[in-house]
Image (cartoon, rainbow, N blue to C red):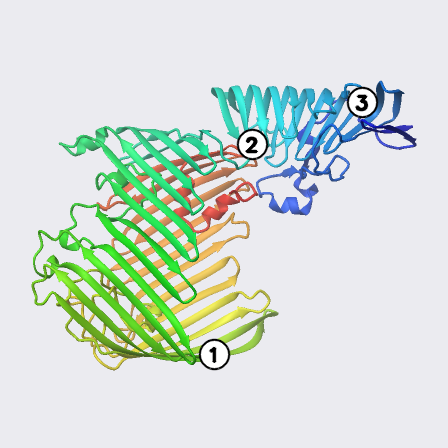
Amino acid sequence: MCARFRLSSLAVIVALAASGVRAEGAGSSPSAAEIDWRPRSELPPEVAERLPVFCEGGYLPGTVGGDGAVVPGVGVDGSAALEASALNARYELDSELYLQGDVRLRQGPFQATGAEARYNQQSGELQLQGPLVSRGEGFLLTGQDANYSTQSGQLDINTATFLLHESELRGEASSLSRVSESQVVISDGMITTCGPGQNDWSIVASDIELDQAEGFGTARHVRLEVLDAPVFYWPYITFPIDDRRKTGFLYPQFGSSSAGSGAYLALPYYLNLAPHYDATLTPQYIHGRGLFTEVEGRYLSRYGESVLQLGYIDNDSAFRDENPGENGERWALDLTTRAAFGGGWSGYGDYAVISDEDYLSDLNRSLEIDQATHLQRRGGVRYYGANQYFEAYLNGYQTIPDRIADVDKPYAQLPEVIYGGSLEAGWLEANLESQYTWFYRDNENLTGLDKANGQRLRAIPELALPMRALWGFSRPSVSLDYTRYELDDYTLGDAGFDRTVPVFEWDNGLYFDRRSSLFDVPYNQTLEPRLYYAWADAESDQNYIPDFDTGIRSFRFDQLFRRDRFTGGDRVGDANQLTVALTSRFNDLLTGAERARVSVGQVRYFEDREVDLFGEGASDRSRSPLAGELVLNPIDNLELRSSLLWDHETRKTEEGRSQLIFHSEDYRYLATLGHTYSRPDELEQTDIGTVFLVTDQVSAIGRWVWDSELDRTVGTLAGLEYNNCCWSFQVVHQNYLTDDEELDTRLLFRIELKGLGGSGGASDNIADAIYGYDERERRRFGNPRR
């Protein structure tokens, strides 16, 4: 016979029915992890698909009960009824219920099974003899015997094992108390994210408390064990059990470098100060230099995020020895802020400063400052509307190398104000681009035109007649490029002068397409010829104007459709030219993806270009080099991009850039192949990078950069990565070329224990070197990391 009971504070309902329910078997009982763990072949398809290739199995979803029924997600409270069933039962009215044989209990999301149970109706206390199993939303417990309170929901289990499904955290304990729906207290316990029977690493402690509501655990008298052997001891630690933030030590970071940093050991400490701001303090010891400290603070407001990063060393012994007379104090600061005010308005700020030119190569590891010759400081506001935009900012620089001459240092913009707008009036379209800038640089030691500072106002009103149809477009336009200067320390004449350049442009394009199929895949092929004419009547000699911010554009395919070959505003190029270009695309009609695009074009010059920037930028050629682009995406995870400049007069390639990118669907395999060539710059480099599986658990990582002009290697990266389902390890050896053209070496490590984070900085360096590696890291243990 099978007895089923539903007990509440109002009534007791007893029902008896015949049943063939199997009782819990005698003998050794499986642990909580063993109950829900399944080989890959037995997992539900949606779970198996997310499982990394190096995992042999995984856990069933935490909302599935032992009988396969979905557990309701309601809270436990005293008013919820306790449902019970057993093979045999004895009930004393208003006193005690005794159940024996395949006992099954449920109250809200709480479930438990055992051999026998006693329920005291007066106190609401339930004693359950094992082997027992208790299941709730997202967790599973087993034990020898237990006490359960139907009023509070507290469950005390002796000789327990447990499993938290979301974090895949399992463990065992001499005793375990589930004091609330989200809080578990463990005595003499062990926890790990490794699979059943695989204790590659574990945390063993006298007392462990897991708080799923807060997302962290605490432990006392803690040992980190590797293969059941103690490695580290902590008297007290806190650790995350999900992705939420928690104050505490992060994993140590370590590595070595021949570039002045030497071997280092860092111990980051994270401070979760408030929901909207936090900080990370990273003291580190660098061999040969001393104690170096980096601090990062983040602040989040309703407008946006601000990040402040600091680095400081009081007495850098190696720097002091290399630079006699220096006291060894070195520092750096980097501040970034972004804000969105609403209504199209936003603000931003970037400020960086370092104590000396060798700081970035010697010390910097976490500040987001790249190797550079100038550090930019810029802050301003922007507005973007439907038909207009506005921006005002201050911009300056710190020039890092002392060897850069004053004449080559950039000007600051104090301020620069930009406004643009567009207005449609029937068939016509009116546009305005304008810019006001006050340029300043310390020119005390300079002479002539280089000594000048001052103001520049530039405005380009335009009137266009855009015509569009499905089969093409035509857009003739006229504009006036006007510039006004008011200069200081200008010695070539009147310090205030104007420049006016009339401009005419006519852009035309046609669109043809046809449908066909290839390998039973329907596609659409387009043919898009384009003609672009530009005329600008600019005075040929503009070298009486200082060069505040002007340069010469690199000639590529997109430059075919620009009328001005100069950037900035101090030169306006003369033009009388016609561009002829052709583009063809192949679009997959099943997915909408562009599978191929090929473009080629050339400029025909009807007059010599006479405007130059102090000797550069003028030309008497009648035709430009042929400019071409090729993009191939035959499948979703393979892309080839190539651009080319070919000079038909010399029959030589002027510039070429090609890059092949491949990644498998799960990003376990990555490959990049690149080639860059520039005849004017005497540059030719080949770049090869790859990540591939040696076995399901071991991956090889490599990158090699070869400079054909220098006839030498200018960068390498080689490493190994080991993954299993609960931890991973990376070791990477990196060579890179420094400013003094010497190859320096770094040896980087990273260890990650699944669920507890990682240490070391190898991953960031690999992600910078190999396209797709950051996405591979995000998918490391199967679930994308936040």
Tell me which label, 3 or 2, sits earlier in the chain.
3
Label 2, secondary structure: give it. loop
Horizontal and vertical percent for residue 273?
A: 44, 32
Q: Which residue is mark 1?
A: 511
Horizontal and vertical percent for residue 244?
A: 52, 36
Label 3, secondary structure: give it. strand
Give me the residue at 83% from left, 28% from top: 10
Q: Nearer the viewer, residue 438 or 132?
A: 438
Please say if 619 is above or below 361.
Answer: below
Quadrant position of residue 130: top right
Tell me which label, 1 or 3, sits earlier in the chain.
3
Crowding at dot 1, Cα within 10 Å, few <14 / some 14-19 / many 20+, comes out as: some
Q: Amino acid at mark 3?
A: Ala
Horizontal and vertical percent for residue 594?
A: 51, 66
Q: Which residue is mark 2?
A: 214
Q: Amino acid at mark 1?
A: Tyr
Q: Which residue is mark 3?
A: 115
Tell me which label, 1 or 2, sits earlier in the chain.
2
Q: Are marks 1 and 3 in contact (CB under 8 Å)?
A: no
Give me the residue at 52% from left, 20% from top: 222
Q: CA distance from mark 3 to mark 2?
A: 34 Å
Q: CA distance from mark 1 to mark 2?
A: 59 Å
User: Which disc number belongs to residue 196?
Assistant: none
